Amino acid sequence: MFEQEWRSQGRASQPRTLAIIDDRPTEQYLFPEFLLAQRAFERRGLKVRIVDPAELSFAQGQLRHGDEAIDLVYNRLVDFALDGEGHRALRDAYVAGAVVLTPNPRNHALLADKRNLTVLSDPAAPAGWGLSPTQQRSLSAVPRTILVTPESAEALWSARKRYFFKPAGGHGGKAVYRGDKMTRGVWEEVQRGGYIAQELAAPTERRIRIDGEVQALKLDVRLYTYAGSPLLAAARVYQGQTTNFRTPGGGFAPVFVT
């Protein structure tokens, strides 16, 4: 997959040095996953560094970590547009085409920005896309999503109990609000813009025995894909308004396909 990304961004030779980047990587909950990825890449002959993007520099057409040129970046940042001050060197190198960055701001804008849901959930929009009837029916599962704007704000506040409010570029349930629990103070912030309103979709539940006691936990199923093909399926088990790793007995769970 990474080799395909390398080629699709215009490279013919093989990458030599790869950086796995995140803010304060050793403090990240999934730092052990970075180490697993590092070992996998090293088995393929790459030199791999796990670095904070603030440690990078861009000069003379190269992205560098100290004296070492970086060819390929496995991006684990949640600053999807690379707007942060500590991410400037990475952004400049990406814009200049001096490094292969994956995933990158273009990937996020096309595939992950939540504002896309306003179109995907619009019943009238897919009719002109040349989709098959099966593909059009599959989009009916996307909860109706509306952009929060000054024009839509009054109607959304009145109907807020039907919606979750999410930042368009958010992640991990941060700054996400359930409408029936939202205060006027929070609403003042939401209606300034940058949010979408998505109709509530009740999560599936499973009964799980935890420390000898049977409890009902919520779950969602996530299908990880690349270039339209599935890589793996995983579930997140949790309690609370949004998925999390804090629920006792919760976290990632396997998915069995029958």
Image: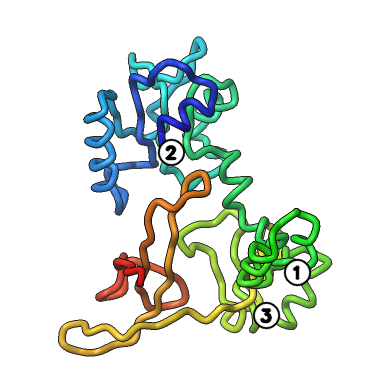
Give the image quarter of residue 38.
Answer: top left
Residue at position x 74%, y 82% from top?
158
- With 121 as the anchor, is 176 left or right in this view? left
Q: How packed is label 1: few (under 14 Cα within 10 Å), some, or many (20 or more)?
A: some
Pair 1/3: label in front = 1
Looking at the rendered structure, the kind of residue marked 3 is Arg
Secondary structure found at label 3? helix
Label located before the other in sequence (1 or 2):
2
Would you name the residue on which mark 1 appears?
A: 123
First in residue order: circle 1 vs circle 3:
1
Front in this rendered view, residue 12 or 155:
12
Question: Which residue is painted at 59% across and 49% down in the image?
Answer: 111
Q: Quadrant of the N terminus?
A: top left
Name the residue tied to disc 2. 75
Of the pair 199 and 181, the residue shown nearer to us: 199
Q: CA distance from mark 1 to mark 3?
A: 21 Å
Is residue 18 toward the left or the right of residue 111 in the image? left
The residue beneath circle 3 is 160
Q: Which quadrant would residue 145 be assigned to in this image?
A: bottom right
Q: Which mark is residue 60?
A: none
Give coordinates of residue 95: x percent, y percent.
59, 26
The answer for how far apart the CA atoms under marks 3 and 2 are is 35 Å
Please state the horizontal and vertical placement of residue 154, each as a whole percent of the image: 79, 75
Residue density around tag 2, few if under 14, some if 14–19, many if 20 or more, within 10 Å: some
Q: Is residue 206 above or below residue 53?
A: below
**Amino acid type, residue under disc 2 in the picture:** Asn
> Depth-wise, is mark 3 or mark 2 nearer the camera?
2
Query: What residue type is disc 1 on?
Result: Pro
